[in-house]
Image (cartoon, helix red, strand yellow):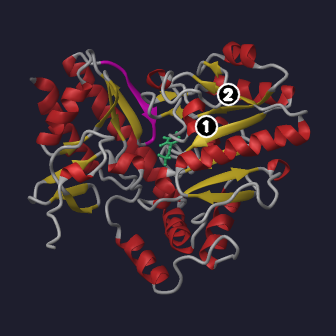
Amino acid sequence: MPSPSPRFESIMFTAKRPPVVMVRGRGSWLEDEDGKTYLDFVQGWAVNCLGHAPPILAEAVANQAAQLLQCSPSFYSRPLLDLASLLVDKSAFARVFFTNCGAEANEGAIKLARKWGQKNRGGAYEIVTMANSFHGRTLATMSASGRPAWERLFEPKVPGFPRAHLNDLSSVERCIGERTVAVMLEPVQGEGGVNVASDEFVVGLRKLTRERGLLLIFDEVQTGVGRTGTLFAYEEYGIEPDIMTLGKGIGGGAPLAALLAREEVCCFEPGDQGGTFNGGALVTAIGAAVLRVVSDPEFLAHVRAAGHHLQARLKALSARYGEGEVRGRGLLVALALSADRATDVVSRAFDAGLLVNAPRANVLRFMPALNVTFDEIDLMIDRLDGLLRR
Ligand SMILES: *Cc1c(COP(=O)(O)O)cnc(C)c1O
């Protein structure tokens, strides 16, 4: 029998996609099968932190693939140890557990906090999370997320996630009770529309959680690995969380994420946590190559400078067309529109060869490669200008 021709209908319908097929990319540019190119300010959802197909990662893949892809979590591999040591050396945490995606890292953080609560807090298990937060799409991380659209989805949810509000410390206090074990938040809510946690709130939260003997969990799946202009966003607040999760950028496009914790919190015992692909040699070799580039102070200075440039140009554009606030940190930036037309702008941008994203009906989000050039930012602004002008 001849093999059937590939069809869009063979993909389970979980996302609206334009009827084009992407074939290759380089840096800030993505190209489809018809040869049309797109200036990419989404980058696989803040995943390709070094842009599309960076030669340094092609080399890391080729070298590692020729030696060892995977040896199961029953053994150490050199890349596994390299990446874990890099992360531990450059962060406030003592140990790392690698996962395949951000949701799985957060699932691990929830399990670790619950286990810690079993051992140290008389079985306390509740984790206070924030309205409009996003922590992933497993059942527990959906339950932890404060997404209004998910409230009645896949009931019954996993219990134990009372909801507070970002930048409202008293709302967190009201959620804390005998069963509370931790507070979990994104330092900048990404999917929620790029809402930045204030210094005052985060410092207050660290103080509050210390006083009450609770763990502070930072979901840095989107903000971590240079995205906000420091290696990890928590650094900008002058505090240290007890647990942190990473994802997205850490693999530079490969499926890799991580759960990190302070020594006192690392209470998993053999059998509590694991998975076939966790910490595989290929993906950790890629992660180590990414982290060596991104942790360079000069690279991080570029992220901050490019972020300032992007914000300044967006502010000027917003003023010209009477749009709303520009907010964010580093290269995680949003432009609030004066009306609910973000989806319309995104689809017209696509036609015009520009990829931007709309986390909310009136918000455009920009998350270019961290090595995006000023010229590419200017070109993006030119294209966006044409779309907002009308
Ligand atoms: C994307 C994201 C996740 C989920 O990561 P996946 O790799 O899609 O599972 C969790 N938390 C935050 C803050 C995210 O941005």
Q: Position of residue 330 (x, y in %)?
A: 45, 41
Q: Is residue 227 left or right of residue 87?
A: left
State which quarter of the image contains the N terminus.
Answer: bottom left
Image coordinates for residue 123, horizontal then vertical, percent: 86, 34
Camera-side residue of 358 and 50: 358
- Up-down: is 301 above or below 63? above
Residue ID for mark 1: 140
| Magenta extent | 324-330
Residue 159's disc number: 2
Residue, far bottom = 67
Asked if residue 81 lies in the magenta stretch, the reply is no
Q: Secondary structure at mark 1?
A: helix
Separation of residues labelled 1 and 2 (CA atoms): 8 Å
Q: Nearer the viewer, residue 73 or 204?
A: 73
Question: In the rendered image, which quarter is residue 172 located in?
Answer: top right
Tag 2 secondary structure: loop
Marker disc for residue 234: none
Q: Name the residue: 41% across, 47% down.
A: 46
Which residue is rendered at x = 68% and y = 67% of the image?
85
- The residue type indicated by label 2 comes to Pro
Establish whether ligand 1 lies closer than 8 Å to the Cβ of label 2: no
**In the image, what residue type sits under mark 1?**
Ala
Is residue 130 left or right of 301 when viewed as pictured? right
- Closest to the observer, 3 or 287: 3
Q: Quadrant of residue 57?
A: bottom left
What x and y, as percent, mark residue 388? 16, 26
Find out whether the residues at labels 1 and 2 contact each other: C-beta distance under 8 Å.
no
Q: Residues within 10 Å of mark 1 (few under 14, many from 20)?
A: many
Q: Earlier in the sequence, mark 1 or mark 2?
A: 1
Question: Which residue does the image show at 29% across and 60% down from the upper left?
Answer: 27
